[in-house]
Image (spheres, grey):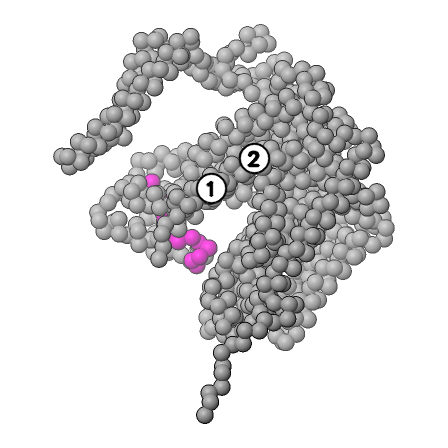
Amino acid sequence: MAIADTRPTRSRPPFWRDERVLRVVIQVIALGVIVAVGYVLFFNLVNNLQRQGITTGFGFLDNPIGVQIAGSDLSPNASISRALMVGIKNTFALVVFGLPVLTIIGVLVGVGRLSSNWLVAKASAIYVETLRNLPPLLVMFVMFFAVVLPLPPARAPATPLGLLVVSNLRISVPWLETTVDIGVFAIVLGAAVVVAAFVWWWRTRRSERTGEPHHRALWSVGVIVAIALVGWLLLDRPVRGSIPTLDGRQVVGGLSGLGSYFAVLIALVLYTASHVAEIVRGSILAVPKGQSEAASALALSGFQRLRYVILPQAMRIAIPPTINQYLNFTKNTSLAIAVGYAEVTLITFQAIGNGNPAPQLVLLLMAIYLVFSLTISAMVNFLNSRLRLETR
Amino acid sequence: MTLDTRPDELLGPPEEERHDEHLTPSEWVRSHLFSGPLDILLTLVFGAVFTIGAVWLVGYLFGSDFTILRVNLANLMVGRFPRDQIWRPAVSLVVAGGAVGLAAGLIGAMARDRAEESGLPFETTGPFGVLRRFWPVVGFILILLSLAGTLTPWLMMGAAAAAGGLLYIVGRVIPSSLRGFGWGLVVALFIGAYLVLIGGGVGYDGWGGLQLNIFLTVGGIVLAFPLGLLLALGRRSSLPALKIASITYIEFIRGVPLITLLLLGTFALGFFLPDALQPSRTTRILIAIAMFEAAYVAEVVRGGFAAVPKGQVEAAQAVGLSPWKQTRLIVLPQALRATIPAMVGQFISLYKDTTLVVIVALVDILGASQNANAQPDFFGQGLHRVTLPFVALAFWVGSYTMSREARRLERRLGVGER
């Protein structure tokens, strides 16, 4: 008896049910729709701009900005592109000072929320639960309208503690000033780092040979501090503290910033730090309890448990979402427009207000932020791939 | 100071029941406030901070003049909504209250059934429990009512609470076969609340105050959800063209601040559209918000897809479902359930972000509070210290309550459990 042939036949289904055909067709249709919509939008844009006599290119970037930028000596006749560069610089001024400060506050508060001290834990919890549930713009308004603006006027600044010069226009804080020998001192510091690296290598090798504890971090830092101190004294203090003082109406020394700058900085730092604190707390809690118990079983002290077992694992969990918060901070600096701090969004806004073409300017602004963001997210992806634990 | 690495209160039983019962008060004080030199120092420092804060708060509450809030209460709530049409927000609030009550009742009934199925104990919340869960909302409403000073708002709130309570009971007792109908009614009530508001020639372009914030939040999410769902599906598609287009859109939007989209909507959107289609100002903002939120909703939904175990798809393939049916019948229902808490988080984040419309000169509650400070009666008196905390309260109450309820819902619906 012949056995029926049950092998699948080679014939293909009709083309409207053939997956290979369908895949191509669907993609062609999708691309067609996207291109069509894009074309219609672009066509409208060019058409509308031309009809209203507005330029379709980017040549307007050489036109004068037409306004005096607060806190900058750039003349109103300077070009829009130069004004935008000032705006980018001001955005950076927020980011550069904001990120380290918010990290420190976030870690302290996040650890504080897990403290066994009831008052510390409650204070941290109140801080986090309050700030996290407020709009950042509102926090900024509070800082600007309810804290900075009620300060003394610029013609009669206050000098609290003798360390600050404070008015509602400008705030000056103690900072560092340098003498002409700063270049030499920089070379000394560079040499100190080289020596410290050598000491690090020597301590490591010695430890490997003899088995004694290396204490290489302690040694290296000690070497740097010692050399720096000697150099600092020999060069007659090339870097020294500078406290702002009032000379008539002029503020001398220290570091001065606009009141609006401090309002934006403090508001965004406090807001973002509350999110970082939650990340830190969650990361510490996410370390399995067995890790801590195993460390106890090995007779590690409380500090050693934290330093060698819990924190390294918690860091691994915390770093990617924290960098995401850095990204949010950077994007949120755009809120400064609402209190008149001249970062890149405000400059763009002013340029649009002076009759420059809005579509190009807004797209340019988006591109600027996109560069910030893509840089940071590339970092996140890199870190993620480096830090990921291999599981199973 | 040592680190207290007990499990998160949210995962374990509520804080009050957790521990410490066996400690006498003096033992508790010693272990929680004075366990070592550093601990004592911290206790002193933070005790001082708390004392100063409390003194300042009492001084603020009893030493401030809240007239500016009383005079501007209607502006803060509904902006320049025509005062002869003010019954519309009131009726709308009652209807929405009923919808919320019904939804809460249905969720409660579903959680009860689920607990019965699995044989787990089901904890019911008594009146005091409800008060403990919703004290921020209740407190805020009481503040509003005391500022209003007339009887009508009390009646309105009473009616809303009554509608909510009544429909909550309805939601709890109706048989499970009618629940689909119940959810339909919830949606219908919300649409009804919207129709009452929008009727009578007061389009949403005339809205302001807190009403505008709520409208932009709800409208933004409702418009963004379908687009976000499509983007999420596109992102996990095996078709390269769809995948690349979705990823490009999502990453582009997530890389720029919301303000840039609001500026685009306000100043540039008109150039991209033909003359016949020039949208109104609020519509432009709504479009910008929906475009922005869609990218974030897509990421939330993607997270939901990731929560669906791979075995589910493999099982669906094994029973011979087509790719489309695998997605629609197996993956999507599970993925969407897993997204509920994150969607609430997104909703909260948008609620906070709606304040940004101040920058493009729409008058939301924050804008109304700034305008109040520009009125001749109140100008230049530093009354921001009165108005801004009030606005802060409106946002804090909403965000805090929603995020707590989302975590509760997460546990009740058993999201993340299998």
Rendered view: B118 above or below B204: below
Dominant SS of magenta comes to: loop
Q: Secondary structure at mark 2?
A: helix
Q: How many marks?
A: 2
Give yes or no for contact between labels 1 and 2 (Cβ–Cβ under 8 Å): no
Bounds of the magenta span?
A: B1-13
Q: Quadrant of residue A337?
A: top right
Left or right of B19 in this view: B282: right
Q: How packed is label 1: few (under 14 Cα within 10 Å), some, or many (20 or more)?
A: some
Residue at numbered disc 1:
A380
Give the residue drawn at x 63%, y 63%.
A22
> Label 1 is placed on what type of residue?
Val
Query: Does residue A353 appear in this view?
Result: no
User: What percent of the width, then of the height, locates residue B342?
Assistant: 55, 54
Q: How packed is label 2: few (under 14 Cα within 10 Å), some, or many (20 or more)?
A: few
Query: Does residue B46 appear in this view?
Result: yes
> Label 2 is placed on what type of residue?
Val
Give the residue drawn at x 59%, y 46%.
B248
Residue at numbered disc 2:
A371
Give the residue drawn at x 61%, y 38%.
B257
**Is the same chain shared between marks 1 and 2?**
yes
Left or right of A378 in this view: B40: left
Query: Please, which residue is most extreme toward the left here?
Result: A210
User: What percent of the width, then of the height, locates residue A207?
Assistant: 18, 34
Name which of mark 1 and mark 2 comes first in the sequence: 2
Give the residue drawn at x 46%, y 31%.
A100
* Label 1 – label 2 distance at C-alpha: 14 Å
Q: Which chain is home to disc 2? A: A
Q: Secondary structure at mark 1?
A: helix
Q: Quadrant of residue A88?
A: top right
